[in-house]
Image (cartoon, rainbow, N blue to C red):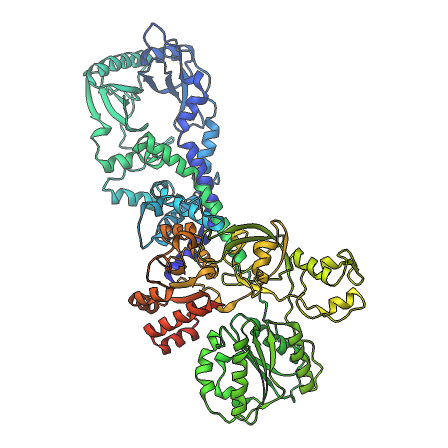
Amino acid sequence: MFKKFLFQIHWFLGISAGLILSIMGVTGAIYSYDQQILKWVNTDSYVVQVQSSPKLTPAQLYQHFTTIQPEIKINSITIAKDPTASSVVNIEKEGERRGYNMMVNPYTAQVLPEVQGRKLLLLIQQIHRNLTAGEFGKQITGACALMLIYFVLSGLYLRWPKKHSARQWLAVKPKLKGRNFIWDLHAVVGTWVIVFYLLFACTGLYWSYDWWRSGMFKVLGVEQPKMQGHSGSGRNKDQLPKIQLDNAQLITALNQTWSGFNNQIGRDYSTLTVNLPKKDDGKIELSFVDATPQHERARNQAVYNYKTANIEKMELYEDKKLNQKIMSSMLPVHRGSFFGPVYQFVAMLASLAMPLFFITGWMLYLKRRKQKKLTQAARQSLAGHYIDQNAKPWLITYATQTGVAEQLAWSTATSLQEAHQPVQVKSVQQLTEADLQQHEQILFVISTYGTGEAPDLASNFAKKLLKTNLRLQHIKYAVLALGSKEYPDTYCSFGHTVDEWLKNNGAKALFDTIEVDNANPADIQNWNQALVKATKLDLHAVNIEKVFDNWTLQQRDLLNPNSLGQPAYNIELTANHEAIWQAGDIAEIQPGNSPERINKFLQHHHILKNAVVDSLQVSIEKALWNKDLTGEIEPFANLDHLLEQLPTLPTREYSIASIPSQQVLRLVVRQQYDESGDLGLGSGWLTQHTEINQNVALRIRTNESFHLIDDNRPIICIGNGTGIAGLMSLLHTRTRHNYTENWLIFGERQRAHDFFYASTIEAWQTMGMLKRLDLAFSRDQEQRVYVQDIIRQNAAELINWIERGAVLYVCGSIDGMASGVDQALIHILGEEQVDELRQQGRYRRDVY
């Protein structure tokens, strides 16, 4: 929970302060090279033609300007050793706190063109420091700098993996797509710039808050200099009266200082600045920069006494301790020049990268927000209808694995309430003996799962309540049993088990159990009719509305060339509409007939393929695309009569392997063959009969029992074969939330041919998104190994994960794998704990 809290604060502050930090980053990057930019733009001001005569001394420059412009007041004169560099005369100018730098030709004293771009760079500096909003803006940028420290520290904590590798931390993974790539870019580049951003923030706060600045001096053990205010017209009583020097005295002083200091300094320098004396005490302050300085502000300070012809004081920058250097060079530390030109350049790039985090952070936020818009396909509101208070209440209870039984239960409840009947709906796992004793009218909507089993969440009901003998003579009931005739031996068997238990305990059936094959509308209509007859109520039809959308088949790739098993394909579809689903949901497709099968049917019945169906105004060839052509056909008078005899082909369901933020719906489909050797309905339609860029009728069905938990508890994903699809969607979502406590156990035949999505899975492992990966390729060794064997081999680790709150997700074939995993879990944890995990929603299955 702590990590989730940090993440929530991280993204909330990020989308709030990200724009300001982006502006500060870009302006800071530009201003870090302010002098280089000015020199590049103003070469006529900074560079002169070398002449044979020596450069003019400070005294000569002073004499020149006081002669031709006696009104100006000169503060300092800077001479550069570089023969092509101009000299700088700093003069007093209104509005310029530090004076105005006048660029002059060092050989002729000619005033060079005014430096252009200073005002723009000053504006950029103001935007960087206070958004040009004065003290208020400075508080905003200061607060954003504090947030940047939080982003650095929380981002590091949120990303911290259990396995450390340089590749995981520092390499952008170009193979990732969509949201995963955005997150990886955000995290990896964020790791690159951690040091820079932490330094930017800590040093930038030096100018934002007095308390921070004072704290830096204390932490680094440097005495903080006292701030000197502007004296204005007043004078400090302790200050000695100034005795001004006349021009002749100043020229003499400058000459003596220039020649004497250069003779005594004993070291090379790049520039020397002479500050004009304000009083006649024989002292002139100088500052100079070494020939190869540590940075542009690594200035040495000196005092020269021209009366005694001695250097009275010399403070060399190189002699300072590191803490003193840092505190006296805060701007170079902030912009990076303190650490050398290479670091400064990289720091500039890091600063320019600030908008990247704002943009990717917003993209991740918007994708997260979009995906939270969940569809409520099954549940309908029961509010807003008049209820007959004298009517006996109905209890509708359901046992569901994929959500169809729940949807039918709620649809039935709505129908009854529209007839003014009081209704309560609850799942069988919530059903108690008290509920059975308190209600006289109960409808059971019961799904059969797998090979005749109760749905996972109904297992406790099946093992406990169905084993109990109760007195239920007061109950009138009906059972709607859901199943699939693809499993004829166990068709609707759990529904019949419930019906038998109710009869054995004295309950009276309103009508015989209604069986529903794969949500067949005709079977559901039998339920409607039976309820109307038994209740004598005017009930609206109960149905599952299946509205299919057109999706486009964009890509189809064979995943397992040369495999020992049947071909398995990666199927990618896109929608022309906004499509939203959750990890764990199901794609239900409406298969169609191949052109060959339709032509064969038409030829057999001597029908022209271009013949028009009157009611549809389309050709019979098109009208037959989704009709079951395998049944017996009675003689027909016209094509409409023919179509009435042909039921719609049953739909097929596939686990979705992708999430909406990837902009594609991905399926894993293995080709299946029927007894006659023909490709199966769904697999044939998707892997062979449908052309690329052709439409596929598809609807997304919520599969709540396999939905992902919404917190960072560990998960264990177990699957085989095409079951990898459902697990991939879960893991895509987990990586999106930066949840790393993921364990994948996957099995197939051969690693070389059947390791589906290997590059993505291995990238997750490298990134630290998979805490553990165990693979069982049964044909890669003499003794076959399956996922249930991996579970048994790692029993201690499994128990550890379960004790830490892990949730189990199993996806794949029910025969062999799912049952084997179930037995392995019971062997390790005990049947009681496995049942408890089911009831807690910590053992979830999507098996077929």
Q: Residue at x 21, y 25 (%)?
A: 314
Instruction: Give the left or right position of residue 60, taking residue 265 as reference.
Output: right
Asked if one can make out residue 836 in the rendered structure from this viewpoint, the answer is yes
Q: Position of residue 695 (x, y in %)?
A: 64, 54
Q: Position of residue 535 (x, y in %)?
A: 67, 86
- Against 302, residue 367 (above or below) is below
- Against 398, residue 502 (above or below) is below
Q: Residue at x 24, y 39 (%)?
A: 223
Figure label count: 0
User: Outermost residue, top direction?
Assistant: 52
Q: Quadrant of residue 346?
A: top left
* Image quarter in which the N terminus is found: bottom left
Seen from the viewer's position, the closer of residues 312 and 667 is 667
Instruction: Give the left or right position of residue 419, taking residue 143 as reference.
Output: right
Asked if one can make out residue 134 in the rendered structure from this viewpoint, the answer is no
Q: Position of residue 552 (x, y in %)?
A: 61, 52
